[in-house]
Amino acid sequence: MTSSAHSPKILVTGGAGFIGSHTVVSLVEAGFEPVIVDDLSNSLSSALDGLRAILGRDVAFYQADCNDREAMKAIFEQEQLTGVIHFAAYKAVGESVAEPLKYYNNNLGSLLLLLDLMKEYKVRTLVFSSSCTVYGQPEHLPVTEETPRLPAQSPYGNTKAIGEDIIRDAVRAQWPVKALALRYFNPIGAHPSAEIGELPLGVPANLVPFITQTAAGMRPSLTVYGDDYNTPDGTCVRDYIHVMDLADAHVQALRQLNETNADACYDVINIGTGRGETVLNVIKTFEEATGVSVNYTIGPRRPGDVEQVYADVSKSARVLNWKTTHSLAEALRDAWRWQQKIGAKVASE
């Protein structure tokens, strides 16, 4: 795929990460020109090789820390940016509890610096990576964007809530920024080419990589934390969205902001499927979709786990003209294909 000199340039912070790399593909396919900045602290440069294989060309890449003012200023100076998608953040919930200041410094500092530079260089559109963690354990399901935010269960979750507030307040102060905060539910899957996917460093914190690693024999067993919740089979319920659907939502968010006449605006939008799936149903669907069995055991509840949360997605359909198109089975097949690819690569090295 070739770039055009007239393609709008979009800064993608954390663009070598799981969601960021898939969004880079969707941006190029939609006629945008992504510019990746990533310090590779929670991702690998091999994602850039995967992007090259999918796109047939390189994408502009800067290895830099989003809290490094001089480095970021140089990127804004060099590239004629028209928008920013801000993914870059520390995201390990447990680590955030142990090291809260590290998370506040990194996650909020990078956002403040970006907003400063956007103002200075007259970059007007921002899509912010938020999270359904801001809802905590909601009283009513599904959650709408009007559902009250509850106190965060972790400093990581709190950085998402505070990040939303920072952007909202900047816009209220009539900064010329048009912004959307996308509250993701649970991204899973991989690009269907298996060239890029989720690559957790160390022990996975998320369910699906744990399933695929267990199925591949890398881990002896998967622990399901609790089977006595008030859910259809007693296990926790989440809204699992294919990462390619999530990537496309960012493209639609940019388009919506570009079509907005206001100089400054801010809104929040849920990005999910609108369906809740239990942990046991995800395991069962994986086994049916791949023909591979998963060894799992039932363990005690894990402190801090929300019993169930899933999205009301009517606003994303109305405002973004977007909805998911991939099934849970598709997402799990793609995740398994990716696991097989990286497993074979590791075995050959």
Image (cartoon, rainbow, N blue to C red):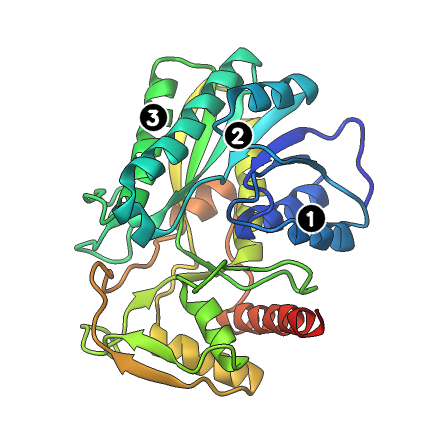
Q: Which residue is mark 1?
A: 48
> Where residue 313 sits in the image (x, y, percent)?
39, 52
Taking the spot 63% from the left edge, 74% from the top edge, the residue there is: 340
Looking at the rendered structure, the kind of residue marked 3 is Ile
- At horizontal 53% and vertical 12% (from top left) the residue drawn is 120
Task: Residue at 36% x, 31% y: name it.
Answer: 105
3D distance between C-alphas at marks 1 and 2: 28 Å
Residue 124's quadrant in the figure?
Answer: top right
**Real-space Cα separation, disc 3 to disc 1, in angstroms:** 31 Å
Q: Amino acid at mark 2?
A: Leu
Secondary structure under tag 2 reads helix
Is there a contact, CB below 8 Å, between mark 3 and mark 2? no
Mark nearer the viewer, 1 or 2 = 1
Q: Nearer the viewer, residue 42 or 237?
A: 42
Q: Quadrant of residue 34?
A: top right
Relative vertical location of residue 130 with respect to residue 272 in this rendering, above or below: above
Q: Which residue is mark 3?
A: 166
Q: Which mark is residue 257?
A: 2
**Mark linked to residue 199:** none
Of mark 1 and mark 2, the one earlier in the sequence is 1
